[in-house]
Image (cartoon, rainbow, N blue to C red):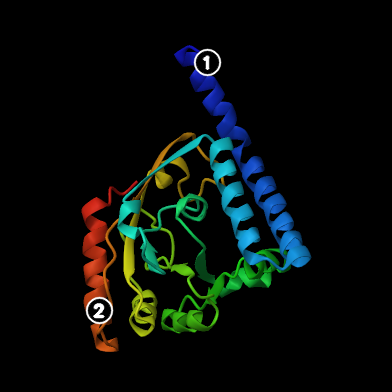
Amino acid sequence: MGEPQRVERGGLRTAVSPYLFRSMLVGMGAVAVALHRLTGNRTLTWRFAKARARTLAWMLGVRVQVRGLEHLAGRGPFIFTPNHQSHLDILVLLGFLPGRTRFAAKRELWRHPVVGAVLDTLGMIPIEREHPEQAVEALNRAGPGDSIVIFPEGRRSRDGRLGEFKKGAFVLAIRAGLPVVPVVCRGTRRLMPRGSRLAVTPGDVEIVVMPPIPTAGLEYADRDALAARVRAAIEEQHLGW
C-alpha cells in the first residue's frame, strides 16, 4: 500500500473512531453486566473486559507496547499511579496492565445508571475528586489480590505537563502496606488529545512500568515524601505526549 493510501485509510479510521469508540464501549459494557449477572463470576467478566479493550485498541489502530512488566513478576497486588494525558489512558491500561486492576473513578460517573452498572460490575471504586484522601475506602471494596489504578493528578493534563499530585493514592498505599508502581503512558495525548470528542488517530502508545516502591514501615506523615518519590520516577520517563 502506497503512502497516500495509508494516509487516506488512517484519516477514515480517525473519522469513524468516535462512533466505534462509543458503540464498542456500550456493547462491551452491556455484555459484561449480563455476563456477571448470569454467572456471578467476576474473574470471567474481567477477562472479557480486558480482551475487548485490547480488541478496541486494535480496531482503532492503536499499537500498544508495554515495557517493564518484569518488575511485577511474582509480586502484587499494587497501587498503580499513572500519569493522565488522555481518555485513551484508561483503555490501554485496562487492556494491557496484568491482572485485575480496579480503577478509582470520580463518583459523578455513577450518576449515569448504565455507566454506574458497568463500573459496579467491574468493581471500580468511586472517590470524591475534592477529597482524594477518602480513597482509603477502596480497601473495603477491592477483592483480595486486586491491584488498584489511581491517577494521582486526578484529571487529564491540559498541556502535557504533569499536574499537581493528590495525596489519596499514597495514603491508601501506606495504610494498605501495598507497593506503589509508577506508570507512564506515552503517546496517548498525541493520538487522542483533550477536546477530541473521542476521535483517535492511529499510532503507537507505550506503557512504561517502573519498579515498585515499597511502603512497608511508612506512616501517614510520609505521604508527601512518597508522592515526591513517585513523581520523580514518572518525570524521568515522561515526554508530555
Say left or right for 170 vs 122: left
x and y percent of residue 4 in the render?
48, 14
Type of amino acid under label 2: Asp
x and y percent of residue 1 in the render?
50, 13
Circle 2 residue: 224
- For mark 2, give the secondary structure: helix
> In the picture shown, does residue 132 fall above or below 202?
below
Residue nearest the viewer, comparing 215 with 190: 215
Q: Please identify the residue farthest to the front as the structure is shown.
A: 74
Say left or right for 145 vs 110: left
Say left or right for 226 vs 105: left
x and y percent of residue 171 in the render?
35, 81
Q: Residues within 10 Å of mark 1 (few under 14, many from 20)?
A: few
Q: Residues within 10 Å of mark 2 (few under 14, many from 20)?
A: some
Residue nearest the viewer, comparing 16 with 69: 69
Q: CA distance from mark 1 to mark 2?
A: 52 Å
Q: What numbered label is drawn on residue 5?
A: 1
Which quadrant of the view contains residue 81? bottom left
Query: Which residue corresponds to the image point at 76% horizontal and 66% vertical from the top-left?
Result: 37
Q: What numbered label is drawn on residue 40?
A: none
> In the picture shown, does residue 78 fall above or below 209?
below
x and y percent of residue 153 in the render?
37, 66
Type of amino acid under label 1: Gln
Which quadrant of the view contains residue 32? bottom right
Q: Earlier in the sequence, mark 1 or mark 2?
A: 1
Query: Which residue corresponds to the image point at 65% horizontal and 51% vertical from the top-left?
Result: 25
Residues marked 1 and 2 touching at CB (< 8 Å): no
